[in-house]
Amino acid sequence: MPKSLVIVESPAKAKTIERYLGSDYVVEASVGHIRDLPAKATEVPAVYKGESWANLGIDVDNDFKALYVVTEKAKKQVAKLKKLLKSSDGLYLATDEDREGEAIAWHLLEVLNPQVPVYRMVFHEITEKAIRDAVASPRELDHRLVDAQEARRKFDRLYGYKVSPVMWQKVKPGLSAGRVQSVANRLIVERERQRIAFQTAAYSSLEAEMSSDGTFTAALTEINDVRVATGRDFDAQGQLSQADRTIVTTDQGKELASALTGVEFTVQSVDSKPYRRRPAAPFMTSTLQQEASGRLGFSASRTMGAAQKLYEEGHITYMRTDSTTLSADALSAARTLIRDRFGQDHLPADARVYTKKVKNAQEAHEAIRPAGDAWPNPVDLGFKGDKADSDQARLYQLIWSRTIASQMNDAEGQTVTIRLAASPAGSETYEFGTSGTVITSPGFLAVYGRQSDESNEEERELPNLSQGDTVVATSLGSKDHQTKPPARYTEATLVRQLEELGVGRPSTYASILGTIQSRGYVWKKGQALVPALTAFATVGLMENHFPHLVDYALTASMEDDLDQISVGEIEPNPWLDDFYFGGVNAKGETLPGLRNLVSDERLADIDPVEINTIPIGVDNDGQVVVAKVGKNFPYVQRGEEYRSLPAGITPDEITLDLAIELLETPEERVLGRDPATGIEVIARPGTFGPYVSLGRPPKMPVASSPGGQLLALPLHKKELKVALAYMRCMTDDPDNDSVKQAIKNPKRGIGDAAIKRLIEFGETHEITLLEAFKRSKEAGSSPAAQKAIRSFLKLRKSIVDLREADAPAALRSCLEQSGYIKDLQRGDNADRLTNIDALVETSRVFDSIVEVVSEL
């Protein structure tokens, strides 16, 4: 008997839903996206391989038409879905209800081409009621949501495929650029720049232990009615931001601590005011990531991984949302639980409604909460034994507590502030102050406590004092302080900043944080995100040459535009046209098109040496000291001197003094000679600390020199080995290995056996392989091999004639005439062709091909 086929994204989700739907339904997973733009040239269908846009996957001259292909990993699953569909009487597309989920549903529809009724089934929690309601009330596919997802995907492909190669050429291979990740990098680098520019200021504070009916502590706040400066009173230059402040110095603090001990203080005022704190809203994706970081120490990816499992197993609602709203059923469930477990006195008269959404909210339409209408504790869900402390159990507890707390009473209490003053022996007047809070009604704090970014200061009850009462300062202590630069971003605070700027989506933050770390832009020092010098170089490149692509407001406006596309207010193709070919933004400002920004003519003006150089300062002799990214490791340089930077050093620690200290550290020290070989044993400083070597390694050229720029390329890659072999073949006496490389790339009909015969002939007659080629008939080569050899010798003569041209033109012409470029263009070799382009570009710093070869 035919059954209806239900398709979801993941096998775990399918298993849970199938349990609820019963035997009339078959539930199968698509296992994520089944189609995408081609990831490599081999995925491009044969009919499109000749098209100039095929590898990009977008025909920019034909309304940005996308070339979608079934991904390699999805082919087997697609075949399975097609087979299941043949015996089904209906198809339910039950993918997630956000843009990505809608797009997956559309791709399934396009690929499966069902001949049975199709229904779009949506839900935001996997409970039996929610699933049955979704089956009973399907909707049509939302093509406007699909348009928005397609526009986002095309935009990101154009951005990544056009800007990333600029990074490879101008900074180093393996880097990437992206709409959100480049902005995230800029935020992190800007914060580090602030830390580098920060000027520290010193000040002291004074705290007294006061004795009355009991003891309490108070801090010095004023001297002669002038406020005592605290850290917040200084600016980034180390100066007081307000004139009406006085700085307590170290010596003054010690003197006051001694002078005021035993002095009687009079209470000037006692102020009491009600204390009230409201609970925080239920979680959306970004706040869940932030709170899990602060309370549980989870990274964003760890949080989302645990949340995904909780959702698929039916324990929480959909975890990618930027809404704080709770449904009527959820409000009822929360209030019932609070009444039953905590009592009526913890329940407000009316349900709390949180309607605030972050900028650009568009994902699901409810906050993250426990699923269903009964919200059990983790233990009741089976999180026992080893699982009781699992990521899922801890995250569920956090979500459960936050959701319940959001519907409980405010925390209430009383805050008392006391001001005390004394003028010992008629000297200056010193005022101290203290405050304490007593919670009289804990409200939501009974279940949730303070948020991770709030002070953990405990409640403090002060003695019952009145104006005019006296207390004695029984002991005092001074403490020295230094102002601190702005704290580096953590994953949680970076997510919060991106959210406030309106950049990115909740569903993208975890992957963005992973990308900027895996690409080497950022590393972690504890919880802090530290930018590598590579990030400084790439951010500088973007700010100076692609400023609008890392502009915060413009990037956020792109999210606004995608929202408008999703509701049909903007058409996607004109929007993409403005981005790629140039246009005018909402403010009437002209925006440059991406195509022109990455043109060869414009990129030629970008100096990679300048991009990869970060100024540090000038030494006493007027010599400029800089830090540089480097091919393998960052280093500092002064003139022709350079030293690698120690591993783990942060950019704000790379001061002029440190750089000079590194540069003036002896490059080597001879420890003695190896008894067995007589070779010197050398001690040298290195990136990861001192090391010893047997003999001296060859001295590397300075990175900014022609040789240094050449060696900065990935010369170990096959394509560059082949290119260098052809350059050597342009000289008068190429070595045998270079000739063999040229013969085999591309293949020229001269097999290994024929080459081996010619090498042996050359060794017998003490001639090179090239000379043996000229005597191939004498060497016994077959007629076919002789013909191929004659063709190669003719090619070599033509490329030798090219060497008089300037180096880049000679190299480009050589590789084109050889057929190697055309051979690479036939396959998935975009990265290899980019490396060839980088070699051609680098050869500009040499006068000739012969000079390039001699450098190697």
Image (tube, rainbow, N blue to C red):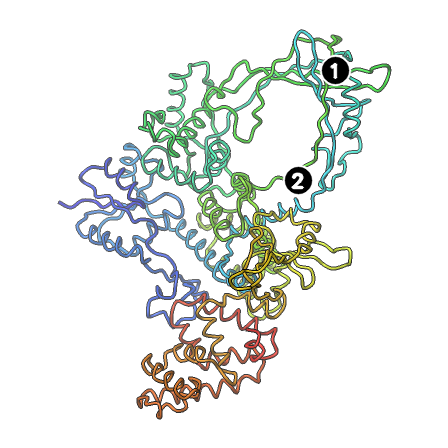
Residue lying at the far left in this picture: please name it: 1
Residue under label 2: 485
Looking at the image, which is closer to me, 286 or 384?
A: 384
Considering the numbered disc 2 on the image, is that residue within a helix, a strand or a loop? Answer: loop
Question: What x and y, as percent, mark residue 769?
Answer: 42, 84
Question: What x and y, as percent, mark residue 717?
Answer: 45, 67
Q: Quadrant of the N terminus?
A: top left
Three-letter amino acid code of the residue under disc 1 = Leu
How far apart in space, not on screen, are marks 2 and 1 (Cα)? Answer: 33 Å
Quick check: can you spot residue 574?
no
Total numbered circles: 2
Residue lying at the far right in this picture: please name it: 426
Looking at the image, which is closer to me, 783 or 483?
A: 783
Residue lying at the far front in this picture: please name it: 675
Q: Residue at x 58, y 62 (%)?
A: 680
Three-letter amino acid code of the residue under disc 2 = Pro
Question: What x and y, as percent, mark residue 286?
Answer: 48, 38
Bin the neighbour count of mark 2 within 10 Å (Cα to Cα): few under 14, some 14-19, many 20 and up: some
Left or right, residue 176 beside residue 649: left
Q: Residue at x 53, y 47 (%)?
A: 523
Label 2 vs 1, first from the N-terminus? 1
Q: Residue at x 27, y 35 (%)?
A: 132
Considering the numbered disc 1 on the image, is that residue within a helix, a strand or a loop? Answer: strand
Query: Residue 420: which numbered mark, if any?
Result: 1
